[in-house]
């Protein structure tokens, strides 16, 4: 697993499903999402390539509760001692205190979902381990220990408690699964629990001043991301 640089302080770790982002903090590192169960060794190996040790991971931010985002969080907490932050509405799903809502698939999404689930079955993944969330994040919260302000946005629709992180000083957006990229386009991510709500969240993110877009599925956008977001047509994606 080779870290792919996006900025001087952000790297993407590309997995077959669900990319992970590593962010260098003033006193260590943060991880945004954790990939599927079993991904922890690859993530820690990538961290070592950046000169980091497990104990240097201060925070794990989960953009939402799906297995390809929280799948290795428990293993990484055990290895690093990092604090886990997640959207307040999704936190009960991550903890295992409430059942996770099922996505409502469009016909075209249903076929894709069947392909993805078949791939999961063939991979013989370890079981998902639920875990505690140390800090429930709400819309308007700010993470103040990243070297620059990080704004938390509650962007429901993909899951009820999905969050995005916006770093306005650097023009960086971590969108979670509300946004994906494909074939040079910025699109609405599939598999949403509330499609219209997801579209509204997409439009909220498109209104931000963004130069660099970090997505969990697809290629990052390293310049002009705001223009691509505003030119997107989420109402027409995955119909």
Image (spheres, rainbow, N blue to C red):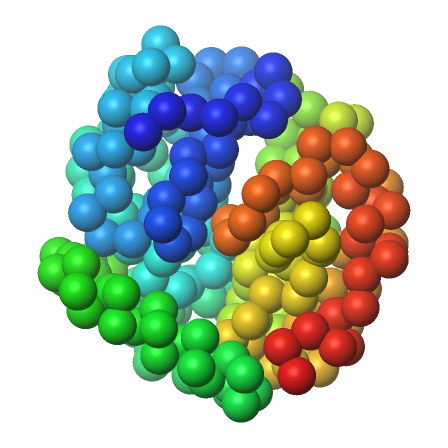
Q: Give the farthest residue toward the top.
A: 51
- Side of 150 where 72 appears, left or right: left
Residue 228 x %, y %: 81, 50
Vertical comparison of 139 with 10: above or below: below
- Side of 168 where 175 appears, left or right: left
Residue 108 x %, y %: 54, 83
- Side of 60 where 211 appears, left or right: right
Residue 152 visible in the snapshot:
no
- Residue at figure coordinates x 55%, y 71% from the top left: 190
| Quadrant placement of the N terminus | top left
Residue 78 visible in the snapshot:
yes
Vertical comparison of 168 with 115: above or below: above
- Residue at figure coordinates x 54%, y 22% from the top left: 5
Residue 62 x %, y %: 45, 50
Q: Give the farthest residue toward the front.
A: 183
Residue 225 figure quarter:
top right
Residue sitting nearer the eye, 210 or 83: 210
- Residue at figure coordinates x 36%, y 50% from the top left: 16
Residue 196 x %, y %: 71, 82
| Quadrant placement of the C terminus | bottom right
Residue sitting nearer the eye, 162 or 116: 116
Report the number of numbered marks.
0
- Residue at figure coordinates x 35%, y 79% from the top left: 114
């Amino acid at each position: 697993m080779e870290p792919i640089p996006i900025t001087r302080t952000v790297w993407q770790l590309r997995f077959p499903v669900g990319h992970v982002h590593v962010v260098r903090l003033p006193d260590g590192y943060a991880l945004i999402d954790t990939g599927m169960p079993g991904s922890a060794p690859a993530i820690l190996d990538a961290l070592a390539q950046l000169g980091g040790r497990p104990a240097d991971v201060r925070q794990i931010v989960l953009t939402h509760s799906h297995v390809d985002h929280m799948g290795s969080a428990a293993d990484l907490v055990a290895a690093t001692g990092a604090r886990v932050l997640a959207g307040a509405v999704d936190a009960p799903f991550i903890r295992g205190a409430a059942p996770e809502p099922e996505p409502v698939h469009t016909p075209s999404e249903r076929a894709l979902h069947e392909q993805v689930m078949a791939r999961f079955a063939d991979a013989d993944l370890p079981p998902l381990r639920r875990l505690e969330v140390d800090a429930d994040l709400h819309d308007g919260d700010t993470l103040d220990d990243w070297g620059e302000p990080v704004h938390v946005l509650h962007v429901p629709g993909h899951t009820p408690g999905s969050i995005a992180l916006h770093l306005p000083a650097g023009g960086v957006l971590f969108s979670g699964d509300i946004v994906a990229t494909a074939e040079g386009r910025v699109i609405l991510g599939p598999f949403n629990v509330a499609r219209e709500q997801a579209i509204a969240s997409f439009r909220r993110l498109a209104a931000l001043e963004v130069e660099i877009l970090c997505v969990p599925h697809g290629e990052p956008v390293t310049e002009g991301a705001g223009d691509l977001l505003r030119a997107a047509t989420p109402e027409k994606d995955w119909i």
